[in-house]
Image (cartoon, grey):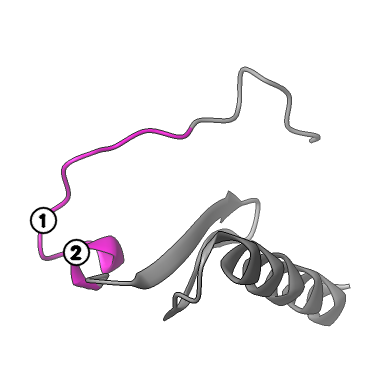
């Protein structure tokens, strides 16, 4: 399945201590993807918006290559 605009969301949500996002603090960044294979969370130190986006995208590409 290819995601379309009805499948995507970006929004603040409340999480509890059972969620991996609960432990993301300060300048840390987290990219959480829900895939056909399950939920994937990539957490790392933030270094500004450009570096964070590059790192998250790079991690996603590496993870995808390992799956296929």
Q: Could you say where residue 3 lies in the image, as x and y percent from the top left?
A: 73, 32
- Left or right placement of residue 28 versus residue 65 in this view: left
* Image: magenta residue range: 10-23
Estimate the x, y position of residue 21 in percent, counting from the top left: 28, 62
Q: Which residue lies at the image location 63% right of the left edge and 71% below the top edge?
A: 51
Numbered-mark total: 2
Which residue corresponds to the image point at 37% horizontal and 33% vertical from the top-left?
11
The C terminus sits in image quarter? bottom right
Q: Residue 50 placed where, x, y %?
A: 64, 63
Q: Is residue 51 magenta?
A: no
The picture places residue 54, in percent across and down from the top left corner, at: 70, 68
Q: What label does residue 68 carry, if any?
A: none
Alpha carbons under labels 2 and 1: distance apart: 6 Å
Quarter of the picture containing the N terminus is top right
Q: Which residue is mark 1?
A: 16
Quarter assignment of residue 66: bottom right
Write down the residue under mark 2: 22
Query: Height in image: 35 above or below 43?
Result: above
Labels 2 and 1 touching (C-beta < 8 A): yes
Q: Residue at x 50, y 61 (%)?
A: 31
Give above or below for 26 relative to 7: below
Q: Camera-side residue: 53 or 67?
A: 53
Query: What kind of element bears circle 2?
Result: helix
Q: Earlier in the sequence, mark 2 or mark 1?
A: 1
Task: Give the crowd class for mark 2: few <14, some 14-19, many >=20 residues within 10 Å.
Answer: few
Answer left or right for 11 relative to 1: left
């Amino acid at each position: 399945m290819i995601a379309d605009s009805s499948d995507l969301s970006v929004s603040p949500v409340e999480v509890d201590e059972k969620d991996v996002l609960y432990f993301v603090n300060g300048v840390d960044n987290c990219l959480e993807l829900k895939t056909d294979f399950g939920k994937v969370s990539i957490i790392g130190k933030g270094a500004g918006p450009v570096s964070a986006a590059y790192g998250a995208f790079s991690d996603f590409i590496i993870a995808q290559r390992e799956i296929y």
